[in-house]
Amino acid sequence: MSVPLSSLPVLPPLGTESPTAILKAVYDLGIPVHQEERPMQSHHDRYDYSPIVSRPDYDWPEGKRLAFYIGLNIEHFTFGKGLGHTPTMAGRPTDQRHHAWREYGVRVGVWRIFDLLDELKLPACHLVNSTVCEHYPQIIERIAERGDEIVGHGRTNSESQGDLAEGDEAALIGEVTETIKAHHGTRPLGWMGPWISESAVTPDLLKEDGYTYVMDWPCDDQPIWMRTRSGPILNVPYPVELNDAPALLNRYHTAEQFQRMIIDQFDQMLALSRQQPLVCGISLHTFIVGQPFRLAQLRAALEYVVGHKEAENVWFTRPGEIARHVAALPTGTVPGG
């Protein structure tokens, strides 16, 4: 069904958009937005308040102070239904144009990014939808060849796990775990939900399925232990700000500005890591920075990072290695421990 341009909503001018205006525009476009009703709570009770300036000091391996990792989102989307990114807000995420734009990431973008990481000798973690294993097995083979880590990232980014009932969510987590294990040879120990989505019991279900860490809570620059009904689970920092999807697609930063953001974040966190050990992550998506004009800016930023004069103080790593290091620290070193 064609939609005349005159019937499309007028989005607010850049820099003036309010959440209400954006939400109204999304509704007017016919894009379903689920707002789950949950009982009001004064606190989630997953962790206590802990000011970073009052915590015990510790080091990363070899006395390094900044842990740097790249988190590459490798995602699969169903055709014609469900959720999906778009290059701009003005469009339906399920049409062939936007679906094909996202498929560029797994057909082309991811391979360019793999080559860049190989050239710079950078490790990475890959946040992988389990359906990627079935549809794009060559990608899983390349991840294994690189010795990289796979983080569980739901079944597909066409759905949000926070919408599911507890039994259905537990089944989804189990299915994802077994699918990745069957194709990669190793089960994931870390998890980040599609769209960074959680239900009220997600950390509990992950702990009960054998996961040791999550990346869904962007509350800190250090890992922290979180409570679950079955014991603690670690939260490894994952960036919402230094993330190409919201930065380039929602906040309309340019590729050059995103390069500057990476460099500024790295420089500032490296300086701050003299006071506390920190985690600096970069979140990327294959169909966004895999575009050649953006890949050029990513290359410039990563070349700056690996060539920095203080790179000897940086631990180039993966979230799973961060989690293992923290788990071996004395009790009480890390908040919640």
Image (spheres, rainbow, N blue to C red):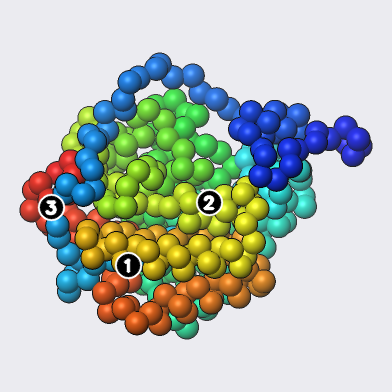
- Expressed as whole percent of the image width and height from the top left, the position of residue 87 reads 70, 52
SS for tag 3? loop
Mark-to-mark CA distance, 2 and 1: 37 Å
Mark-to-mark CA distance, 3 and 1: 18 Å
Q: Amino acid at mark 2?
A: Thr
Task: For marks 2 and 1, give the one nearer the viewer.
Answer: 1
What residue is drawn where x is 26% and y is 28%? Answer: 45
- Expressed as whole percent of the image width and height from the top left, the position of residue 232 reads 20, 40
What residue is drawn where x is 22% and y is 58%? Answer: 276
Q: Is residue 52 visible?
A: yes
Q: Is residue 153 left or right of residue 291?
A: left
Query: How would you rate the neighbour count of disc 3 (Cα within 10 Å): few for under 14, some for 14-19, many for 20 or more?
Result: few
Q: Earlier in the sequence, mark 2 or mark 3?
A: 3
Residue where numbered disc 1 is placed: 270
**Residue 238, disc:** none
Query: How would you rate the neighbour count of disc 2 (Cα within 10 Å): few for under 14, some for 14-19, many for 20 or more?
Result: many
**Residue 56, disc:** 3
What residue is drawn where x is 68% and y is 31%? Answer: 21
SS for tag 1? helix
SS for tag 2? helix
**Residue 131, disc:** 2
Q: Earlier in the sequence, mark 2 or mark 1?
A: 2
Is 197 located above or below residue 114 in the figure?
above
What residue is drawn where x is 27% and y is 33%? Answer: 46
Q: Is residue 217 left or right of residue 231?
A: right
Is 243 located above or below residue 264 in the figure?
above
Rendering quarter of residue 317: bottom left
Along the line of sight, the residue nearer the viewer: 126 or 243: 243
Q: Amino acid at mark 1?
A: Leu
